[in-house]
Image (cartoon, rainbow, N blue to C red):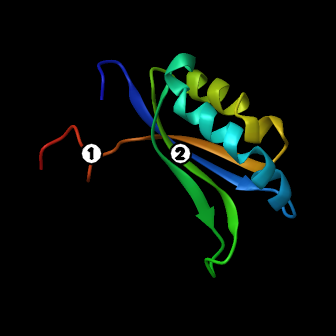
Amino acid sequence: MRPSTRYYAVFATDKPGMRDVRERVRAVHRTYLRTASQHGVFVRLGGSTLAPQCDALNGTLLVIEAEAYDDVMRFVRDDPYTRAGLFEHVEIRPWDWNLGNPEQRV
């Protein structure tokens, strides 16, 4: 972690029946994540979440490194998935990454 930054876990849950939107916007969303540094944040981990039966995508989980909560909120607000109305609920939590953190030696 860079000095004065923190990790944030972003949990975004899809609205029901939005599979087509997710598929249509996915490439633009992924490009956006890869260019996060242009928006002042760094996406460290990311991927789709799955329904309990693991047979359908139902959301997104991101771990973002940023200087401030507001930077993460702005980044998520401008995400193509958010702009397309995919998410029913988004929760951003400051996260103290310990176990598995590549910058800490255990």
Q: CA distance from mark 1 to mark 2?
A: 15 Å
Picture quadrant where residue 53 is located: bottom right
Q: Nearer the viewer, residue 54 or 1?
A: 54
Residue 40 seen in this snapshot: no
| Residue occupied by mark 2 | 62
Q: Nearer the viewer, residue 77 or 26?
A: 26
Residue 98 seen in this snapshot: yes
Q: Amino acid at mark 1?
A: Asn
Disc 2 element: strand
Picture quadrant where residue 13 is located: bottom right
Q: Could you say which disc has been placed on residue 22 in the image?
A: none
Q: Could you say which disc has been placed on residue 101 in the image?
A: 1
For residue 38, side relative to residue 82 (left or right): left
Disc 1 element: loop
Residue 14 x %, y %: 76, 56
Q: What residue is rendered at 81% in x and 61% in y?
A: 19
For residue 97, side relative to residue 16 (left or right): left
Q: What residue is rendered at 82% in x and 57% in y?
A: 15
Instruction: Farthest residue to the left: give it.
Output: 106
Residue 52 x %, y %: 62, 77
- Earlier residue among tags 1 and 2: 2
For residue 65, side relative to residue 4 (left or right): right
Assign the N terminus to one quadrant of the image.
top left
Q: What residue is rendered at 60% in x and 57% in y?
A: 48
Q: Amino acid at mark 2?
A: Leu
Dot 1 alpha-carbon crowd within 10 angstroms: few under 14, some 14 to 19, many 20 or more: few
Residues at circles 1 and 2 in contact by the CB criterion of under 8 Å: no
Residue 88 x %, y %: 80, 51
Residue 77 x %, y %: 72, 30
